[in-house]
Amino acid sequence: MTWNPDYFSKIGYLGVIFAGVAVVLWLIYWVKPNRLVCTVALALSVGAYFTARINSETHVNRIQADRTEELKKRAAQEKARRKALLDSRGDEVANVRFVEDGASDFLDRAGMDEEDLKYFESQGGFGEPDWKKEKKKRSIGGDDDSLESEIGGGESIGGMNDDEFQDDEESEPIIMVEADLVMANRLDLLNLRTTFVFLFVAIGVFVFDYLRRANLYGKASYPFPLPSSWLNALTPMPALVVSRKRCRKSARGELARLARRGDSFLYLTDDPARLKKLPAGLSKFPFFRWKEEVIPVGDAIDDDFIFETVWYGRSSFASGERAQSLDLLDRFLDYLEVRKKSRARVTQTAHLVWDFETPMSARQRERAISLAEASGFSLLVLRQKSAKPSPTNQTSPESPPIPS
């Protein structure tokens, strides 16, 4: 069977190309995941979905079967039927023909009895004479030559206005043989179903890629407060994350990112001025008043209360004094040691945020990383002063810098 180019319109062929390119991009994403690749594939799938429906409604619905052979066959059958009637009723043929006689008035109706009339009417009847058809046509107004008709003839014809005629011309049917019509409908149905499936696959791949990158620092898209179990199932949260921004002026941007993730944190810094720049609450969801409360640590707040609140994700805390922050870090690690022994883990990821000029000691760093891995915490290092390497000893054995 040869391919008929009228199976699809130009928009339909464009949608097929969109779907084909989307499949190629998914194969590329399977080999090497990339955010841009899955985003373009989603856009192409949406385009293929809508072009398939436009093609079905504006092109395939206008396809009609070619009835030329069928009409010829009917004409031949009618001719054979008339010949058979003429052969069987030859003695009843009217010898005199009048101008008003129609094509079926070749038999003398007056010379037939009631039984013959019923038989002839069952075979198609005498039909309506042409003079009656012309009379009806004139009564409708189709051939009215009067002055009134000439004046108002352009407004409507037979109850239809000019706009309806223009619409009919624009929706001119597409004629095909019966086999091509069947194939066009099958391909249209296949195209509609395939693009619908592709749209869901594209959305699924896009959501999968978003969740896969959510725990990758620097590669994640705009965060939303989602359950950490969803994110950790694809990419576990690393126990140590070093900020690339260094947060020279303020830590608000990094802390706001944690709040939008729905995570709680304990912010520790040695600069009281940086603590004052933090707001009392950080928005968790755009355009809503759902906020993560940031409570400054004071003498009236018990360490147990701070740990339990951060552990269960109720609120976050911040400390701006060096001695207080170091003491709170040791206390926090002691609590995590107890939870590690009982194999307890946080439901929603929580963070220890280190914002000091100097790096954390090697002992504290190793201990914090070990406990964070066991309990579901993450150590986030925002700011540290780079140490100048010494010609004899480039790193200090007591306090080596955290790699960035």
Image (cartoon, rainbow, N blue to C red):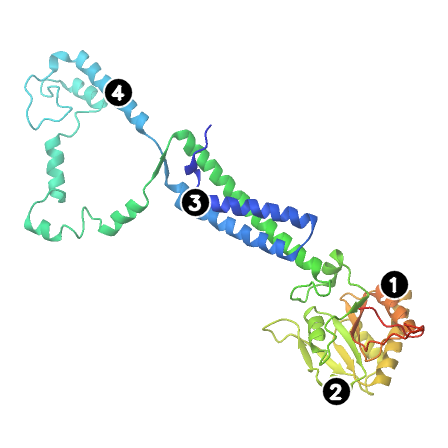
> Secondary structure beneath disc 4?
helix
Tell me how far mark 4 sits from mark 1, CA to CA.
91 Å
Q: Earlier in the sequence, mark 3 or mark 2?
A: 3
Are circles 3 and 2 on residues that touch, CB within 8 Å? no
Residue where numbered disc 4 is placed = 76
Q: Identify the disc placed on residue 10.
A: 3
Q: Indicate the position of residue 273 as horizontal and vertical percent values.
A: 75, 87
Residue where numbered disc 1 is placed = 343
Figure check: 235 above or below 222 = above
Q: Earlier in the sequence, mark 1 or mark 3?
A: 3
Residue where numbered disc 2 is placed = 273
Tell me how far mark 1 sits from mark 3, CA to CA.
62 Å
Characterize the local packing of mark 1: few (<14), some (14-19) or many (20 or more) Cα atoms within 10 angstroms.
few
Q: In which quarter of the view is residue 109 placed?
A: top left
Tell me how far mark 4 sits from mark 2, CA to CA.
101 Å
Residue type, mark 2 in image: Ala
Residue type, mark 3 in image: Lys
Q: Earlier in the sequence, mark 4 or mark 1?
A: 4
Characterize the local packing of mark 2: few (<14), some (14-19) or many (20 or more) Cα atoms within 10 angstroms.
few
Are circles 4 and 3 on residues that touch, CB within 8 Å? no
100 sits left or right of 297 in the view = left
Q: Earlier in the sequence, mark 4 or mark 2?
A: 4
Depth check, mark 4 against mark 3: the one in front is 3
Depth check, front residue: 17 or 283:
17
